[in-house]
Structures are given as C-alpha cells and as structure tokens.
Amino acid sequence: MATTDANAYFDNLETRAPEVREASLFSALPELITRAKTAPGWAAHLRDIEPREITSREALAKLPVLRKSELLVRQKAAPPLGGFATGPALRLFASPGPIYEPEGAGADWWRSARALYAAGVRKGDVLLNTFAYHLTPGGWILDAGARAIGASVIPAGPGNTTQQLQLIEHLRPTAYSGVPDFLKILLDKASEEGRDASSINRALVSGGALFPSLREAYEARGISCMQCYATADLGLVAYETTHEGALCEGMVVEEGVIVEIVRPGTGEPLPAGEVGEVVVTTFNRDYPMIRLATGDLSAVLEGPSPCGRTNMRIKGWLGRADQTTKVKGMFVHPEQVARIAKRHPELGRLRLVVGREGEQDVMTLRAECQSPDDDALAARVAETLADETKLKGRVELLAPGSLPNDGKVIDDTRAYN
C-alpha cells in the first residue's frame, strides 16, 4: 500500500480501514431506508422491507433493485420525481429519457470533489468546465466539486470553440472538465489558429469512454487526463487515481455510496472479477437511491489500490447491460430508435451503429426501405434522428432484408480495451 501523504487525499475517509468503512456505511443504512420510506415512491417500492434488518451486504442484496425504466414510469405517473425525493429541490433537471433529477442545497451535493482532487485540482486552480449547464446537471455536478476544493470555475458549457479559445487565452485555466473528445477539439482548433491553450495541464473527463489513444494524445501534450464515473441520478460513483505519477488500475468507489456488481437482469451479487451490472446505493438525504440499477457493466478488482485509498475498486465502464449506450456523453435508448420508426412508417428494420472516427463518437442509422436511393427520405430521417436523440448522425438506406433479424437495435462497435 502507498504511503498516506495527507496532501494526496481529499480527506481521511479515503484511507480508513475497509472494515471501519463497511461498518460505518451499514450502520447508517437503516436510517437512510427509514427516511426514504417517508416518500411515497420509496414506500411503495420498499413496502415489505424492515429498515432495522438491513445492516449488511447480504441483507441489502435482498432488496429489490430500482431500474431506470421503472423510475421513468413512476415519474410519468407521479410528477415531478415519482415520489422518490425526501427533501426540497434547489434545481430540477431533465436528462434523456426523459428522466428528471433534483439538486438539493449544500456544498458538493453531488460529491464530485474527490474525483477532481484525485485528478490534481487544488485550491486556486481555474477549471474550464465544459459540461452542459442547460437542463442536464453535468455542469453543476463538477462546478460544485471544484468550488468545494476552492478552485475557480469557468462555466463554459459545450460548443462555441472560438469563444472558448478566447476564454482560455485570457483566463488561463489550469484544468479541464467535460466529455473526453471536446478537449481535443479545443486543442486542435487552438493549434490551427495559433491560439495559446498551454495553461491546461490536467483534465477530468466523464460522460463517455476515454479511449487509450486519446489519453496518450493528451499526455503527449503535457496534460494528465483522468476519468470519473458519475450519473445524473447518483452523482459521483467512482474515479481514477494515480500513484507516483502512474495511473492506477480501475476506479476507486466514492465514499458516499455502496456499489454492488450483480448478474444482469437480477439483483444477485457476483464475486470479484465477474463482469456484471453496477447497482448503487447513495446516502443522499434529499434524493436517496437504494439499489439503483445503472445498466452499466463493470467488475470488482480485488485488493487495495496502490494509491493508498482503501475503498473498493471497479474496473471502470465496460459497456451496457442493455442496448442503451452513450454517444458524446448522451444516452441513446432503443425506445428512441423505435420512435424514429413510428415517425417514418416507410422504413422497415432499423439499426443504430455507434463507432469512432478521428477520436470522436459517430453514429449511423441503417434503415431498410423499398427505395434505398431516396436521398430526400434519408435527409428527413436524419432530421428525425437529430430530433429524437439530440445528436447528429448519418443515415444509410438499405434494401429490405439487408439487416440481420437478431433483435439488435443499437450496435456499439467501439473498442473499449
């Protein structure tokens, strides 16, 4: 285990003995469940659960999982949050689905400071935060963590590369946060236009996979790039760390959550090393999540991290347990592809293919139809694709029978290793 240099950690919770952490989390769990059951949504979901009995991982594993599809249905039936909130909301957000999330009052409500700190952000740094602040909570999640550390934040949001380069030259940010691809877009544009973006020397990315070639490209430019795993429902779940300048394997689980890896489609925990679905319980007094099934795949790494943090490690994001995937930081669901089909009855079988070109996510909707040479139809379908997913993509029209009859709606062809 690494030496416990106090300056290397956000606080001493990160280096406490694993058995102390486990005892602390599970002694607090009954109170969390009791508070959750004061909300009608949780009262219905956990109606047969006696909170005082849930004091171990074995007991927690007996609770039903909550799937995002069920959360969506509950929110439609009981707006705005399906009866799952237990405290007042300071802000309300809308994520693709649509699924709605609150933000309550309090410092670092999403608990993102640990990930930023592990990525090297410190008091006095200036963070260029390019996560969106509009409707979705991404920008606010990292903004709150940076301010908890004592860093200044440029609330840049995504896009507007020319204006962002002006900001970078004038305000000299030392760190970047955003989706993995956008920093490269900024750096390439700066090189083209002779702009100075050299002040940025560290980055924390999320919302999509950080491919090894892209990380290496940043390192070649003198930028240490780390990634974290966070969601709009849960806040920070896990984050990358380093030891003596080298990246540690996997991600360390955040101190305010319980992570389980379960057999996909069930709530059954899997042993360390087995790939399964990530299920998370958060200790959030305003919006607790108890065994939320994320749909993401990962696995537990055995043993402590060499960085000295003693919490559980997971391998990071290993894909989706269902066909839902992320493109440029946005979830794309099979239901969205189905809605495209309904809006264009002249189409037959559809498949959305997600890939990579030039270190950026790209998607192509392949659609069978009787007139595969109809460019006007392809253009109309491309407009519908953008309207449904809020992302631009190509459309390829194919002759009937061209796509396999295998039930696959979204085909993610990106290589994650």
Image (spheres, rainbow, N blue to C red):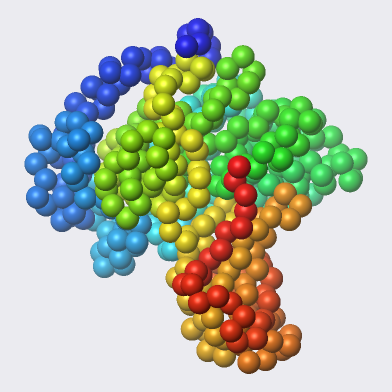
The answer to whether 119 is drawn above or below residue 105 in the figure is: above
Let me know if residue 191 appears in the view.
yes
User: Is residue 158 rendered to the left or right of residue 411?
Assistant: right
The image shows residue 288 at horizontal and vertical percentages of: 28, 43
- What residue is shown at x 35% (from left), y 57% (from top)? 68
- What residue is shown at x 58% (from left), y 17% (from top)? 243
The answer to whether 13 is drawn above or below residue 46 in the figure is: above
Dividing the picture into quarters, in which one does residue 100 lie? bottom left
Between 111 and 379, which is closer to the camera in this rendering? Answer: 379
User: Is residue 361 rendered to the left or right of residue 249?
Assistant: right
Let me know if residue 93 appears in the view.
no
Between 286 and 47, which is closer to the camera in this rendering? Answer: 47
- What residue is shown at x 52% (from left), y 36% (from top)? 228
Between 313 and 228, which is closer to the camera in this rendering? Answer: 313
The answer to whether 330 is drawn above or below residue 229 in the figure is: below
The image shows residue 238 at horizontal and vertical percentages of: 45, 34
User: Is residue 245 rendered to the left or right of residue 284?
Assistant: right
